[in-house]
Image (cartoon, rainbow, N blue to C red):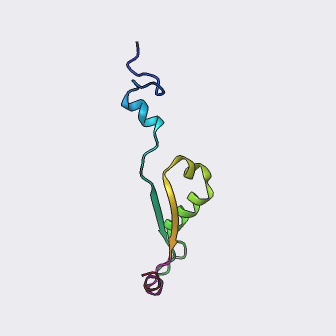
């Protein structure tokens, strides 16, 4: 007899419940634009891939994505 119960029952193990319940936290993922002669920052490449692949967004807790400009003027404007 298996020690693991069906996750829909009240007596389900904590391992089963982890697969049923979504975590209560979410993530805001940021990348950065070009800087110091680097025309395509690797972090902005990752953000674009996350945005293009719906399966990543559906299977994760990513709430928002942003690509931030890397300049003092941009930072002053946003503060």
Quadrant containing the C terminus in the rendered view = bottom left
Residue 40 figure quarter: bottom right
Residue 26 place in picture, x, y as percent: 45, 54
- Magenta stretch encompasses residue 36: no
**Quarter holding residue 52:** bottom right
Q: How many numbered circles are shown?
A: 0
Image point (53%, 63%), residue name: 47
Residue nearest the viewer, comparing 42 with 58: 58
Q: Is residue 22 above or below residue 67?
A: above
> Would residue 54 appear left or right of 11 to someone viewing this image?
right
Name the residue at the top extreme. Answer: 1
Q: Is residue 44 above or below residue 18?
A: below
The residue at 45%/57% (across/down) is: 27
Residue range (magenta): 69-75
Quadrant of the image for the N terminus? top left
Q: Please report the residue visible at 42 percent of the width from the left and 26 percent of the height from the top.
A: 10
At 61% from the left edge and 52% from the top edge, which residue is drawn?
54
Expressed as whole percent of the image width and height from the top left, the position of residue 19 reads: 46, 35
Q: Is residue 25 left or right of residue 45?
A: left
Q: Nearer the viewer, residue 49 or 13?
A: 13
Q: Position of residue 60 (x, y in %)?
A: 50, 49
Residue 28: x and y in percent read 46, 61
> In the image, is residue 46 above or below residue 79?
above
């Amino acid at each position: 007899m298996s020690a693991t119960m069906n996750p829909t029952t009240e007596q389900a193990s904590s391992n089963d419940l982890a697969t049923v319940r979504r975590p209560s936290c979410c993530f805001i993922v940021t990348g950065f634009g070009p800087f110091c002669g680097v025309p395509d920052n690797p972090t902005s490449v990752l953000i674009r891939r996350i945005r293009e692949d719906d399966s990543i967004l559906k299977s994760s807790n990513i709430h928002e994505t942003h690509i931030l400009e890397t300049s003092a003027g941009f930072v002053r404007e946003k503060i």
